[in-house]
Image: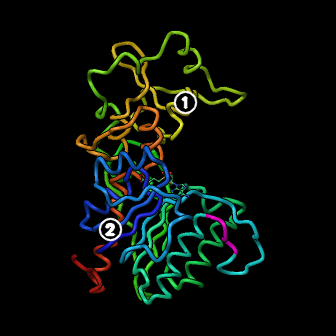
Amino acid sequence: MKILSLFSGCGGLDQGFLQAGYHITWANDFDKYAVETYKANFGDNIVLQDINKVNLNELPEFDMIIGGFPCQPFSIMGEEKGFEDARGTLFFKIAEIIKYKIDQNEKPKVVVLENVRSLKTHDKGRTFKTIKRILEKDLQYKVFTDVLNSADYGVPQTRNRTYIVCFDNQNVEFEFPEKQELNLTLQDLLEENVEEKYFLSDKIIPTILSNGTGGYNAKSEIDLKIARPLCATMAKMHRACQDNYVTQGNRIRRLTPRECARLQGFSDDFVIPVSDTQAYKQFGNAVTVNVSYAVATQIKNTLENLGEWQND
Ligand SMILES: C[S@@+](CC[C@H](N)C(=O)[O-])C[C@H]1O[C@@H](n2cnc3c(N)ncnc32)[C@H](O)[C@@H]1O
C-alpha cells in the first residue's frame, strides 16, 4: 500500500505504518528540523515545503493518505456550504488533495487522520462536525472515530488522541485496535548515565514542587509510573504539574530527548540529529509509534478481509 504522508514531523505516525508493512511514497513538512530528523531515519522521500505551496499535479501515485493536521477553527462556520466551509485550513488542504485525486479517478482507499483529544469539542463541536460532513458527504468515505490512549498500547504515557479512519468502501466494518496490558513504567525507560544539564538547579526546584503556578492549583507529582503527555514546549519552560520530572540519585531531573523518544515508542536506533529543543518539540508533537502500528495493523487486516490489500 502506497502512502502519502502529510504533516509528517519526525515520523511517529509514519514509523507505525512502515512497521506494519506499508510504503511511504511521499511525505511533507515545512519545519526544516523535523525534515532533518525524518531524513536521518527514513530517507529522502520527504519534501520540505509548505503544503499550501505544493502543486497537486506533482504528487506521486498513492493508495492512502495519513496525517496529524493542526487543529484550526473554520471561518464561515454554521453556514454549511459543504466543502467550502473549511477553506483556508490545513484540513481543507487534505480534503482538496483527496478531491483532486477523486477527479483523476484515483480516489485514496483509506484516509487516516490524527488530532488532539479535544477535536470533538473544539469550537463547540463545529470543527469536528464540519470535518465529518466533508469526509462523509463531499468525499464519500465511511468514517470511524475513536480516542486512543498511548498507555493502552504498551507505552507508559497518558496520551489521548483522536483517530479518524476513513474507508472508500462503504460496506466496511472497522474496529479500532484492542487495548493491551501495560507492562512497563516510566522508570523502566530511564537512561542510566545522564548528563548534568538535565538535572534541575536548586533555584528551580521549589517552582517544580509547588502546587501549581499562576493561580492554577494542582499537586505537582514527580516520579509518576505513567508519564504525563509529552508536550512540544518542554524545552522552553518548567511547568509544575504539567511536565515530567524524575528523581535519580536524590536529585530531580527532566527527561532526556532519548527518554522522550522511548515514551513515544521509538526504538533506540532512531537517530536524533537535532538540538534538544527541536527534539523535545518533535517528540512532543509525534504520534506514539505503538498506537500508529496498532491502528495500521488493524486497517491492514480490514483491507485483507475485503481483498483490497496490495503488496507493492
Ligand atoms: C503534530 S505535528 C505531526 C507529527 C507527526 N504526525 C508525527 O507523528 O511525528 C504537525 C506537523 O505539521 C507541520 N505543519 C504545520 N503546518 C504546515 C504546513 N502549512 N505545511 C507543511 N507542514 C506543516 C508542523 O511543522 C509539524 O511538524
Q: By what rule are the colours in the image chosen?
A: rainbow
Mark 2 residue element: strand
Q: Residue at x 51, y 81 (%)?
A: 100
Q: Residue at x 54, y 64 (%)?
A: 53
Residue range corresponding to the magenta coloring: 85-89
The crowding category of the residue bearing disc 2, from other C-alpha atoms within 10 Å (few below 14, some 14 to 19, many at least 20), is some
The crowding category of the residue bearing disc 1, from other C-alpha atoms within 10 Å (few below 14, some 14 to 19, many at least 20), is few
Answer whether residue 108 is visible to the viewer in this image.
yes
- Give residue 251's mark: none
Task: Kindly tell me whether mark 1's CB lies below 8 Å from ligand 1.
Answer: no
Q: Position of residue 241 (x, y in %)?
A: 56, 30
Q: Earlier in the sequence, mark 1 or mark 2?
A: 2
Name the dominant secondary structure of the magenta segment: loop
Q: Amino acid at mark 2?
A: Thr
- The residue labelled by disc 2 is 25
Q: Amino acid at mark 1?
A: Lys
> Left of 200 or right of it: where is 154?
left
Query: From the image, which quarter does the C terminus lie in?
Result: bottom left
| Membership of 161 in magenta stretch | no
> Left of 137 or right of it: where is 184?
left
Q: Position of residue 90 (x, y in %)?
A: 58, 64
Q: Residue at x 44, y 37 (%)?
A: 280
- On screen, 179 above or below 111? above
Task: Kindly tell me whether mark 2's CB lies below 8 Å from ligand 1.
Answer: no
- Give residue 236's mark: 1
